[in-house]
Image: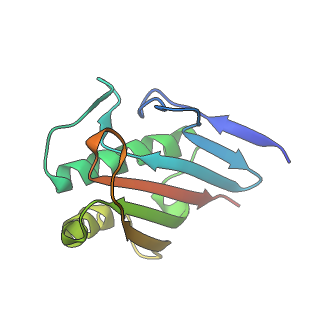
Amino acid sequence: MEKTIIQTNQAPSPIGPYSQAVWVNNLLFVSGQIAIDPATDQMIKGDIVEETHRVMQNLKAILAAAGMDFQHVVKTTIFILDMQDFSAVNDAYGKYFQGNFPARETVQVAGLPKGARVEIAIIAAKP
């Protein structure tokens, strides 16, 4: 199995021993992203909608580094601290897709890195 590491400075640097994304065959596995601004390497200050948009922009940058976009996403996992934020996260997330939505699950968790309130990981495919 050959794998290619995808790395871009347009998304936050990993905060642990992992890659931003790994390409294997025709699949791109993108590590969970939180609302870190890649320009400052700091969590953004904002509400859950602003956090979600920053997360999606980070994912968009990683997809672009692999020559892909949100139309290539086949699976999404959303981790949120509070299920009360589900509607707001869902609305912000939905703005990045146009039909043919990916499969997805949303899970409430007890905690996320750096005090994040939302983290999103994706799998994308390119024929």
Q: Which x, y percent locates residue 40?
A: 29, 23
Residue at horizontal 41 percent and vertical 75 percent from the top: 99
Residue that sits furthest to the top in the current view:
40
Q: Which x, y percent locates residue 78?
A: 40, 63
Q: On the rendered image, what quadrant is the C terminus found in?
A: bottom right
Q: Quadrant of residue 74?
A: bottom right
Residue that sits furthest to the right in the current view:
1
**Whether residue 61 is situated above or below residue 107 in the rendered picture:** above
Residue at horizontal 74 percent and vertical 50 percent from the top: 24
Q: In which quarter of the image is residue 81?
A: bottom left
Coloring scheme of the render? rainbow
Residue at horizontal 15 percent and vertical 38 percent from the top: 45
**Whether residue 86 is situated above or below residue 7 in the rendered picture:** below
Looking at the picture, tell me which residue is in the foreground, 81 or 7: 81
Give the number of marks: 0
Residue that sits furthest to the front in the current view:
110
**Whether residue 32 is situated above or below residue 100 in the rendered picture:** above
Looking at the picture, tell me which residue is in the foreground, 36 or 25: 36
Q: Which x, y percent locates residue 42?
A: 28, 29
Q: Which x, y percent locates residue 50?
A: 19, 49
Residue at horizontal 76 percent and vertical 42 percent from the top: 3
Looking at the picture, tell me which residue is in the foreground, 11 or 43: 43
On the rendered structure, is 73 left or right of 33? Answer: right
**Whether residue 20 is situated above or below residue 86 in the rendered picture:** above
